Amino acid sequence: MSFPLVGNNSINTSITNALKEHRLPHAILIEGEKGNGKHTLAFYLARAIVCDNENAPCGKCRNCAMGINHPDISVTAPEENKKNISVSQVRELKNEAYIKPHMASRRVFIIDFADTLNEQSQNALLKVLEEPPVSSLFILIAESKASLLETIISRCVVLTLNTPEKSQALEYIKSSTKYPDNEILEALINSRNNIGKALDFLAGKADSKTSVAAKEFLECFLRDDAFGMLTATAPFEKSRIETDSFFKDLKYFTAERLKQNPKDYRAVSLSKLYSLLCELEKSLITNINLSLLFCTLTSRAEQITGIK
Ligand SMILES: [Zn+2]
């Protein structure tokens, strides 16, 4: 079975080499926005870990035949109707981690939605990451590592997944679905080349909240409508992940608009907006207040349109 992600070449190389040389780290943190293949990669790694053959996952042995239902692959995620992974779930996982594997030579513990672990749960997890049982490996999945304690992050090898190039994403979707090219291209524009999101768009079940708002923001910017800009950003003031996605969408649409009409009289304003977005986006890794961030964005965007 070959590396399952489109693009992400450096991760492909390091994972493939680590698997070949049997030197996978004890803890891996996979981060990236929704739709970028975090789960695909986590399950590929899990299957490789429980496969005892060369070129793992070989896809042929009895371990591989069990897929992700293998008894040595366990997944911890928030329980139904709960927002967080509880500390008792982490304690349970810890106890399990010290028990010998059932079938394979190693066990894998996938911690999905690791960004929902509260501080107490993270500290409980830290103990097992600090003294990992020899035969257990941990894979944490999160949209962003920002909500994890530095002590947890430092125990993990962090793999940050990126969206592929448009041509790579197009080729992948073309080879795996029957949608016409023009529909795939439109979906890729809406999803900023994010394959998972593009597939959702194509299937008509897109979560396009941030991209709709980003398009709306851009239209308001072009007609110098400050109130409209603020209204477009308002739904995201409580979510750092959505804000991050909104910024990425808006940068993408701004760049696309510039590419389509480089001679447009608003090109200067658009490129200033793009620089502003790059500058403000950096503050997202700090603890900035999101409504303040959006106010700054709107007032500085207004200044740009005011001097055009
Ligand atoms: Zn195998």
Image: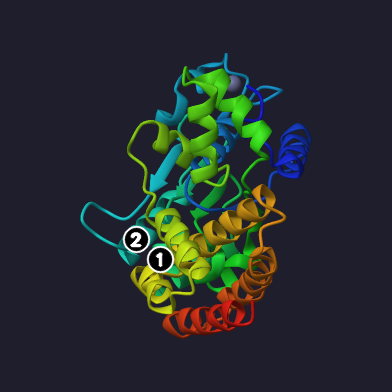
Residue 245 appears in the figure:
yes
Quadrant for ligand 1 reads top right
Mark 1 surroundings: few (<14), some (14-19) or many (≥20) residues within 10 A: many
Q: Which of 180 and 147 is in front in this view?
A: 180
Mark 1 residue type: Leu
Mark 2 surroundings: few (<14), some (14-19) or many (≥20) residues within 10 A: many
What is the secondary structure assignment of the residue under circle 2? Answer: loop
Residue in the picture at 51% in, 17% down: 62
Q: Which of 254 and 137 is in front in this view?
A: 254
Residue 210 sits above or below residue 304 on the image: above
Give residue 177's position: percent from left, percent from top: 48, 20
Give residue 229's position: percent from left, percent from top: 43, 72
Give the label on residue 166, or none: none
Residue 216 sits above or below residue 183 on the image: below
Q: Residue furthest left?
A: 81
What is the secondary structure assignment of the residue under circle 1? Answer: loop
Give the label on residue 117, or none: 1
Q: Residue furthest top?
A: 60
Q: Quarter of the image holding residue 57?
A: top right
Q: Name the residue under label 2.
A: 85
Residue 38 appears in the figure:
no
Do the CB atoms of the residues marked 1 and 2 lie less than 8 Å apart?
yes
